[in-house]
Amino acid sequence: MIRRVVGILGGMGPEATILLQQRLLAEVSARDDADHLPLLIDMNPQVPSRIAHLIDGTGPDPAPTLAEMARRLEASGASALAMPCNTAHHYAPQIAAAVSIPLLNMVDLSIAVVTQRVGSGAKVGFLASPAVRKAGVFDAALVGAGLGAIWPGDMGAMLATIRSIKANGASAEALDTLTAAADEMARGGADVILVACSEFSLLSQSLVARVPVIDTVDVLTRAIRDHIIQK
């Protein structure tokens, strides 16, 4: 069995990075510390705001910081990279160009799982940041898989909920907002709900919807596990 090390571009936000670690712990049947998966984590909450850059147009470009993080992780021994932030995948090309190791692309991996679950031609309801929609983070993957997208009618509520979770943590009010949005999209024709914001992933296991729910952090968790543990 080959055991590799994945480098995590973290801090976007810090709680989401910790959530990824928790879900990785749950993926392994461990009897001792040595049974768990080795990670290199660059927890950098000072990555320039993706929302400020993509929505407000006022902040600096996060790409150079993310590329430098990727280079540090590769130099430290990472055999692949992962990033538990959907919006930051807008900068995936710059990250991939900065290193010689692969980026486990959460966007592409998640759309592949969606396609396996509901098939080509389905419609995906997105619980995500407005920045994901504005930047077209999932557009190419959706087109390639023959999938359509449905978005909540009130994207401002999505952004407000993200900011609330970052400031105050997951809450019953935030869950109510996500539940209402998921229900709206399901009634509007969504065949599956994709939780495509890692702040929302903090609540995804409590989210009840009338259609299947797939969490991008869960998809990334399994990809990291499979990369590290190769028989």
Image (tube, rainbow, N blue to C red):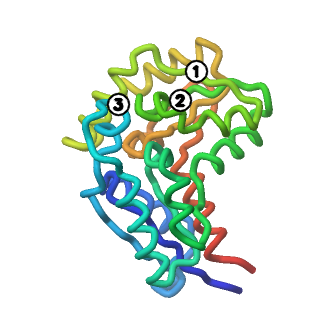
The numbered mark at residue 126 is 2
Label count reads: 3
In this rendering, the answer to whether 229 lies above or below 203 is below
Mark 3 belongs to which amino acid?
Ile
Q: Position of residue 12 (x, y in %)?
A: 34, 52
Q: Front-most of 72 and 205?
A: 72
Q: Position of residue 141 (x, y in %)?
A: 67, 39
Report the mark closest to the observer, 3 or 1.
3
Give the structural element (helix, strand or loop) at label 2.
strand
For the view shown, which residue lies furthest in the left direction?
167
**Residue at the image position 53 percent from the left and 73 percent from the top:** 6
User: Quick check: 15 left or right of 127?
Assistant: left
**Residue at the image position 29 percent from the left and 45 percent from the top:** 49
**Residue at the image position 63 percent from the left and 27 percent from the top:** 211
In this rendering, the answer to whether 191 lies above or below 21 is above
User: Quick check: 222 left or right of 7?
Assistant: right
For label 2, the crowd category at 10 Å Cα-Cα, with few meaning under 14, some 14 to 19 and many 20 or more, is many
Chain-order first, disc 3 or disc 1 = 3
Q: CA distance from mark 2 to mark 1?
A: 6 Å
- Contact flag, marks 3 and 1 (Cβ < 8 Å): no
- Contact flag, marks 2 and 1 (Cβ < 8 Å): yes
Give the structural element (helix, strand or loop) at label 1.
strand
For label 3, the crowd category at 10 Å Cα-Cα, with few meaning under 14, some 14 to 19 and many 20 or more, is some
Q: CA distance from mark 2 to mark 3?
A: 17 Å
Quarter of the image with the N terminus is bottom right
Chain-order first, disc 2 or disc 1 = 2
The residue indicated by pointer 1 is 150
Q: CA distance from mark 3 to mark 1?
A: 19 Å
